[in-house]
Amino acid sequence: MASTEVEYKPEPAEAPSSRFGWHGEGIRTFKIAAWVSVVALLGMIIGNHEGHVEDFYLLGFVAVIVFILVRGEILSRGKWKKKK
């Protein structure tokens, strides 16, 4: 095998994380990071801007992030509840 080739080893069917039942991303961590980003973007509006074009871009990014977060919460509402 050449030095630039990587040996492929498929993951075993029994992943170590399967013992404690975790197979996903840290959704809660992603949500917290997104809200921190929203606060940081809003904080960037404060400053010595002569034109306000950059403020509109910041507000646009904030609106998109908040929309995604709120939409995700609405769509996942009741997802973990047992159906009767």
Image (cartoon, rainbow, N blue to C red):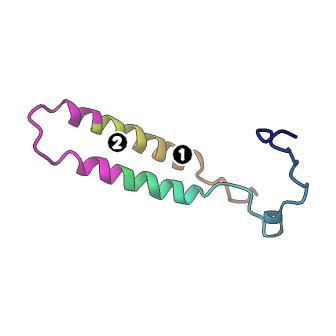
Q: Count neighbours of disc 2 (C-alpha within 10 A) and say few if under 14, some if 14 to 19, many if 20 or more.
A: many
- State the image coordinates of residue 25 (x, y, percent, origin top left): 64, 54
Q: Is residue 43 left or right of residue 27?
A: left
Q: Residue furthest right?
A: 13
User: Helix, strand, or loop for circle 1?
Assistant: helix
Picture quarter containing residue 3? top right
Q: Is residue 57 left or right of residue 64?
A: left
The foreground one among 20 and 5 is 5
Picture quarter containing residue 58? top left
- State the image coordinates of residue 79 (x, y, percent, origin top left): 66, 53
Look at the image and give the residue range highlighted in magenta: 38-57
Which badge, 2 or 1, is on the more N-terminal residue?
Answer: 2
Q: Which mark is residue 72?
A: 1
Picture quarter containing residue 2? top right
Q: Residue at x 23, y 47 (%)?
A: 44
Q: Mark 1: which amino acid?
A: Gly
User: Helix, strand, or loop for circle 2?
Assistant: helix
Q: Count neighbours of disc 1 (C-alpha within 10 A) and say few if under 14, some if 14 to 19, many if 20 or more.
A: few
- State the image coordinates of residue 68 (x, y, percent, origin top left): 47, 41
The foreground one among 78 and 24 is 24
Q: Which quarter shows the C terminus? A: bottom right
Q: How many marks?
A: 2
The residue identified by callout 2 is 62
The foreground one among 60 and 16 is 16
Question: Which is more foreground, mark 2 or mark 1?
Answer: 2
Q: Residue at x 83, y 69 (%)?
A: 19
Q: Residue at x 74, y 56 (%)?
A: 83
